[in-house]
Amino acid sequence: MSRRIRTSLSLSLSLLSLPWVTTSLATTAGDAPSAAELDRIYVIGARIPQTQAKVVNAVGQVDRDRIERIQAQDVADLFRYEPAIAVPSDANRFGTSGFNVRGLDGNRVAVELDGVPLADSFKVGDLAFSGRDAIDVEALARVEYLRGPASTLYGSDALAGVIAFVTRDPQALVDSGQPYRVRSSYSSRDDGWRLSALGAWADGPHGLLALASERRANETRNHPDGAAPDANPAERERRSGMLKYVFDAGDWRASALLDRTRFDSDVDVQSLVRGPGRFATTTALLAEDRSDRERVQFGFDGTPGGAVADWQLRLYRQSSETTQRSLQTIAAVPPRSPAYFRDRLFAIEQRVDGAELTLHSRFDTGAVAHDLVYGLSLRRQQVEQFRDGLQVRLDTGESSNVILGERLPVRDFPNSTTTRMALYLQDDMALGASPFSLVWGLRHERYRLDADSDPLFADDFAFEPSDISRSQTTPRLGLRWEPAGGLSLYALWAEGFRAPPYSDVNIALSLPQFNYEVRPNPELRPERSRGLELGLDWQTDHSMLRVALFENRYRDLIESRANLGVDPDSDAIVFQSVNRESARIRGVELAFDYRIDSRWELHAALAALRGDDLRRDQPLTSVPPARAVFGVRRHADGLQPTLELLLTAADRRDRFDRSGPALFEAPGYAVADLLADWVFGEHWRLTAGIYNLADRRHWEWGQIVNQPAASTPPIGFFTAPGRNYAVTLEGRW
């Protein structure tokens, strides 16, 4: 553990002895956590509900109460106090770009909403990117996450881990006694306002939930010095709605769900004006970005007893569409080129249809008790993408669809259909009366990519796109030891894999003006991982400790569009996705909760990782520095609110691949947040928070992961927000 993390830990613990803490953190015994809250229930570890002590994996959870207490405005906020999950983002234009789990990110992390996979992320150049954040936090009941290879249960996307979002249920709201809720919130971080309305009804076996939510905001503020500009001016709007119907007949249940989320963003991208590389002559850049996700889902589950204790069938269709328009003005460079206006469009549409059947059986063979989960998964994904544009000479008004030597419209890869079929099982075997259990699992998955070279693609590229087919059997093996006293220890060995993506196998791009081209690579091999994890879970009536030590080794990791140098035959600079030999990521993760008495709670969490490219003997840039969170909470007492003080500390960023341009070495930091929560009478709840109390100027790793040390704009542009606040008022009936 680094000296900065040790210093932050000492500072956090010393806060507990200060007199002002014990007087100002006054709250009520009425909402103190129970032992049941310490022993959480997880579904993500085995696809069935399990107590934390039974999960043979490093897992975590953010429940609905926590989402409301921290006033999460977006998916990045959900993991603000979860050091094991990082959320990279783009400060110039696009915002949140995905999730980083144990040093790997992008499409190597499986992201699901009620079991339905979210659309893949895809980026081409600096003006086109589709992310994975088409979720409204108002719809969520909780989010669970699993760290480490999870391909046995979740397939090839889960090379690094799984993020599982779960939406709210009508019966749970009805059972609360307050099924109708209206929430209004404001955040000064981005001058954002949110209004949402939620209602649930139940009549016999019938249940219905309806949700509508809208949030309007401006740019997320940074905290620059005098040399750096403020954040780019922006106007953003997210609208979402959800309808969920449930029919509960007792031993079986059916549900139907329809939801839609639309996100609109207009950004004046001033940070790229006179910017790096191709933006050196840019005098104006305006961005209009839209994303739209629609989902229809049906679910059936039952508890028949007998050979099958319970089962679940899920059928779904989800469509995701992203369109991005870039309006760019280019200054003249006499005598080489005149002034131009460029209007460029990027669009990508992804549709996924799927079915998943999960069964759960309990039975004995001699002295061994089996808890068996098994199932079948089918998924078909269709992807279409294109870019278009128009260039106008400002001196003559002449227009052309050729930009940088590239004739538009163009597809960067052919229309692609991927099909995945899998059979999986996992058996939790209790070995008689001993405290040992053996947990093993196996998945066989077949992946097929079919590429369609339509006229738009074929007119630009002469090669025939490749179809590929891959099959993989992925095992996992765990041993759990549960001696007396609430202690559980486990050892887990797991493999993971990821099939070569369509966007790497068949991508093709040519920019004659810059003399470079991107070539397809149908010979790509699947990415593979092997991981060993040792874990400890210890729980009492008042405390919980969870520790995980792990080492994951990867081979054939795909580097998208790697620079292969100059082709002697064409003199063009060639980029191509290639497999790298091997990498290793190892680390420690810790979470600790302690309830001192009916009012006081302590919390601590830590994630410290180290990653290396073993082939080139270089650190992995994708591995974030160590991060820790320390918190103290005192629950409400009479008219006084629940108050919580949280300190987030991060180590300096000094380990990254140094074979290329020098990257920015962000200093370590520690920032404090103060949260408050009041309940007024039976119907009203007021939540408030002050974030970055000391107005500390700092850089979060997710915004500077690939940022050069010699940055344009100046590095201060990429700072996290200074002191800001949020307030939420909720009515419940």
Image (cartoon, grey):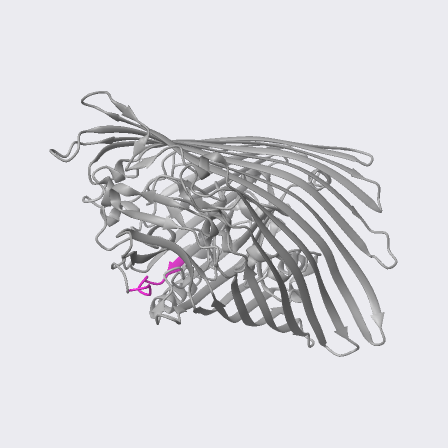
Q: Position of residue 439 (x, y in %)?
A: 69, 70
- Between 211 and 48, which is closer to the camera in this rendering? 48
- Residue visible at 38% across and 66% down? 5
Q: Quadrant of residue 583?
A: bottom left
Look at the image and tell me in which quarter the C terminus lies.
Answer: top right
Whether the magenta-drawn stretch holds residue 649 is answered as yes
- Between 574 and 59, which is closer to the camera in this rendering? 574
Whether residue 599 is visible here, answered yes or no, is no
Q: Is residue 49 above or below residue 284?
A: below
Q: Position of residue 679 (x, y in %)?
A: 57, 40
Left or right of residue 200, residue 303 in this image: right
Q: Quadrant of residue 533?
A: bottom right
- Between 263 and 503, which is closer to the camera in this rendering? 503
Q: Which residues are magenta?
A: 648-658
Look at the image and tell me in which quarter the N terminus lies.
Answer: bottom left
Left or right of residue 713, residue 555 in this image: right
Q: Position of residue 177 (x, y in %)?
A: 71, 37
Is the magenta region chiefly helix, strand or loop? Answer: loop
The residue furthest right is 306
Left or right of residue 344, residue 179 in this image: right
Whether residue 635 is visible here, answered yes or no, is yes
- Residue visible at 59% across and 44% down? 381
The residue furthest bottom is 434
Whether the magenta-drawn stretch holds residue 15 is answered as no
- Residue visible at 68% across and 49% down? 378
